Image (tube, rainbow, N blue to C red):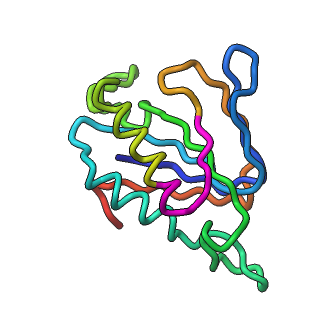
Amino acid sequence: MRTVIQRVSSASVTIDGAETASIKHGYLILLGVTTDDTAEDVEWLTGKVAQLRINNDEQGLMNKSILETNGEILVVSQFTLFASYKKGNRPSFIRSARPEQAIPLYESFVTALSNKTGKEVATGIFGADMKVALVNDGPVTIVMDTKNKE
């Protein structure tokens, strides 16, 4: 499971010309699910995201988690996070989980993150052609991967 977490001052998802989700200050999380992800990956990753201290404290230092702020969360599925570009110029997405495996893990991630933060988590629509708009605050962008726990 791989995420790109962006601290944003605003973010939104538009599908077929209609805005379906939006947040003010908080996190836009792009989430990719691979074929070997499990509930253990969901548990580890949501724990890390909930505790991640990338919000500014009173001195302007990144020292507060989303738990300590009034931040909101928007999660968008993105199978392209597992693109393989090793051969040729057209990426392969063979490592990305098929919808029948990815959707339950995506939904589990959203539910677990909501439970761990006590916040409602806004989402895009899995598999839809989404237009994602954001204003990156900082900019602050963090990549986490459950198979490469740095």
Farthest-out residue, top: 16
Quadrant of the rendered image containing residue 137: bottom right
Magenta-tinted stretch:
113-123
Task: Report if residue 114 lies within the magenta region.
Answer: yes
Residue positioned 72% across, 80% down in the render = 57
> Which percent across, then down, holds residue 41?
30, 53
Near-viewer residue (7 or 91): 7
Task: Report if residue 28 lies within the magenta region.
Answer: no
Quadrant of the rendered image containing residue 61: bottom right
Residue positioned 35% across, 67% down in the render = 150
Q: In the figure, is residue 70 to the left or right of 127? A: right
Q: Is residue 87 above or below residue 142?
A: above
Q: Is residue 110 above or below residue 95?
A: below
> Which percent across, then down, holds residue 121?
59, 47
> Which percent across, then down, holds residue 96?
32, 31
> Which percent across, then down, holds residue 130?
61, 24
Farthest-out residue, bottom: 59
Residue positioned 34% across, 61% down in the render = 44
- Residue 87 seen in render: no
- Residue 29 seen in render: yes
Residue positioned 64% across, 76% down in the render = 64
